[in-house]
Image (spheres, rainbow, N blue to C red):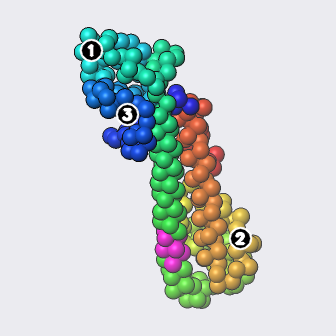
């Protein structure tokens, strides 16, 4: 755990006042205030070291960190370093390490909360886009749906093959068998922009029978289904990107492949 302690992003170090005032170290400083100056300087230096709470076990480095002259360091280092442990070529202060561990925990919690808030905002944005596209497509098709059937001769049981056969220029129009709901290329383009990771035409054909049972809620139902598939595809892309960034291999660029 100590190897992970890094609080260099924090410009401050917590000071637990009562804990310090009641400590034996501060009692010694009461008798020799000069020692307090050197001790606090070492704590501050250790706070921004990696791992936090430790300093290289070298007299020159320690004297410099304490802002102490070499001669004074030789005289007082035994007193100044009381409470520090020596291991792995470094000196370690348990209290500074404890405070750093707590700070790292809070940083991770804050990072998690920030990421969750960002994801929530993105889901809300995607939902807003879905609602807007659903409304636009619904209005566009509903406005001319009856008139279009009369003028083009498309009956309620007309299939997509019938539409294409009647007029090859309509090859981009989807006519769903259950209700002959028609989507123009402009309608489809709106959904393509809202759901960039979804193979739209394939998904619409797959939804034909199911969507036909939704009646007047057809556009809302289909938009919801597409939005779900968009989220799933986006999550796969994000996961593949994370694996690539960790050196786990090169992901495929398109989840539909």
Residue designated by label 3: 26
The x, y position of residue 67, in whole percent, is 26, 22
Residue 231 lies in what quarter of the image?
A: bottom right
Q: Residue at x 48, y 14 (%)?
A: 89
Q: Residue at x 51, y 86 (%)?
A: 143
Which tag, 1 or 2, sits closer to the chain's start? 1
Main secondary structure of the magenta stretch: helix
Which tag, 3 or 1, sits closer to the chain's start? 3
Q: Dot 3 lies on which element?
A: helix
Residue designated by label 1: 72
The x, y position of residue 114, in whole percent, is 47, 54
For residue 208, the mark is 2
Disc 1 residue crowd, few under 14, some 14–19, many 20+, Cα 10 Å: few
Residue 17 visible, this angle = yes
Which tag, 3 or 2, sits closer to the chain's start? 3
Q: Please, is residue 221 above or below residue 87 in the view? A: below
Q: Dot 1 lies on which element?
A: helix
């Amino acid at each position: 755990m100590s190897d992970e302690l890094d609080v260099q992003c924090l410009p401050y170090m917590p000071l637990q006042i009562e804990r310090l005032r009641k400590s034996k170290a501060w009692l010694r400083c009461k008798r020799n205030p000069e020692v307090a100056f050197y001790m606090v300087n070492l704590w501050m230096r250790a706070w921004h070291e990696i791992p936090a709470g430790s300093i290289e076990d070298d007299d020159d480095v320690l004297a410099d960190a304490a802002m102490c002259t070499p001669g004074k360091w030789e005289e007082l280092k035994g007193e100044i370093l009381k409470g520090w442990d020596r291991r792995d070529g470094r000196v370690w202060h348990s209290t500074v390490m404890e405070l750093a561990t707590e700070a790292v925990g809070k940083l991770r919690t804050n990072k998690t909360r920030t990421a969750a808030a960002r994801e929530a905002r993105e889901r809300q944005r995607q939902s807003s886009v879905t609602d807007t596209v659903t409304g636009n497509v619904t209005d566009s098709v509903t406005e001319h749906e009856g008139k279009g059937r009369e003028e083009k001769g498309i009956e309620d049981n007309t299939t997509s093959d019938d539409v294409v056969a009647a007029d090859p220029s309509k090859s981009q129009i989807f006519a769903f068998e259950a209700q002959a709901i028609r989507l123009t290329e402009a309608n489809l383009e709106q959904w393509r922009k809202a759901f960039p990771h979804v193979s739209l035409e394939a998904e619409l054909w797959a939804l034909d029978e199911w969507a036909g049972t939704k009646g007047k809620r057809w556009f809302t139902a289909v938009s919801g289904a597409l939005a779900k598939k968009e989220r799933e595809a986006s999550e796969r892309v994000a996961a593949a990107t994370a694996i690539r960034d960790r050196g786990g291999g090169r992901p495929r660029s398109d989840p539909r492949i």
